[in-house]
Image: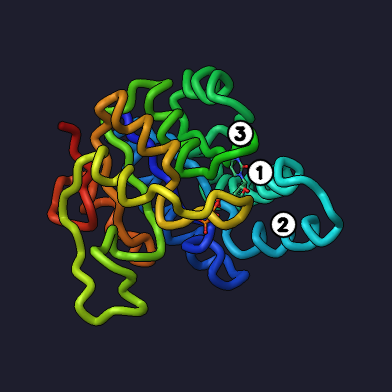
Amino acid sequence: MKIVVAIGGSILLQDYNSERFRQYSEILKDLSKEHELFVVVGGGKPAREYISVVRDLNAGEAQCDDIGIEVTRINAKLLLCALGDFAYQRVPHNFQEALEFSSTGKIIVMGGTEPAHSTDAVSAILAEYISADKLINLTSVDGMYTKDPNKYDDAELVNEITASDLLEFLNGKDMKAGTYEFFDTTAVQMIKRSNLETVIANGNTPQNLVKAINNENIGTRVINK
Ligand code: UTP
């Protein structure tokens, strides 16, 4: 299968150490024997810290986004280091480059592309662009909850949701640089219009990636109706 995997920056860079990169690189190397893999890496805490400095310097939102994009590309380079020869050792800056580089048969790793969305959207657009069979979004929560699980004890994990319902749920959430809530609406628009098979799961357990690929019941599945 052709698979796009989005890994949130908060997953790879909770602390500044190599462990997560190593764990993910082992799993990705293994999966690449069977699947064609495209990985999109988020910015995490370093991106938010840089963005807050630039914002204090009175930069506009798009300029803040631009700094966020640079950080995602640095994170992509770290994952490339861990993957070594299994990956194509250049970070695509746009979708066409991603497609071009993939002709090498190696794992492709990229970060952001342009302002006004997050790497969730990049992963969904990339999935459209390359006609992926699956989009897997690894984030810092188990999936989508009925309410904020950090605030409400009775919050329940949603196993399955339509792209339209997810869009409605996300409506009105914050869209400023560095502050994309749970999932980026641009990503959901792509999932909806192209019927992308999508799973959102907790990336703090890297093995969840394998489970999501194998259709095990994990996280939140976005279905299209
Ligand atoms: P992330 O995709 O990591 O955003 O990109 P996020 O959702 O806020 O963070 P995590 O990683 O899931 O916790 C970091 C920031 O970079 C900019 C945005 O400002 C985003 O918030 N960015 C990223 C873009 O403007 N365009 C892109 O294509 C990617």
Q: Position of residue 219 (x, y in %)?
A: 23, 57
**Between tags 2 and 1, which lies in front?**
2
C-beta proximity under 8 Å, tags 3 and 1: yes
Comparing 176 with 200, the one in front is 176
Vertical placement of residue 130 versus 187, above or below = above
- In which image quadrant can residue 23 be found? bottom left
Vertical placement of residue 207 versus 133, above or below = below
Residue drawn at x 66%, y 43% as measured from the top left: 69
Q: Alpha carbon of mark 3 to alpha carbon of mark 2: how far?
A: 16 Å
Which of the marked residues, 3 or 1, is nearer the chain's N terminus? 1
Residue for badge 2: 51
Residue for badge 1: 69
Residue for badge 3: 113
- In which image quadrant can residue 70 be found? top right
**Type of amino acid under label 2:** Ile
- Disc 1 under 8 Å from ligand 1? The reply is yes
- Disc 3 under 8 Å from ligand 1? The reply is yes
Vertical placement of residue 136 versus 207, above or below = above
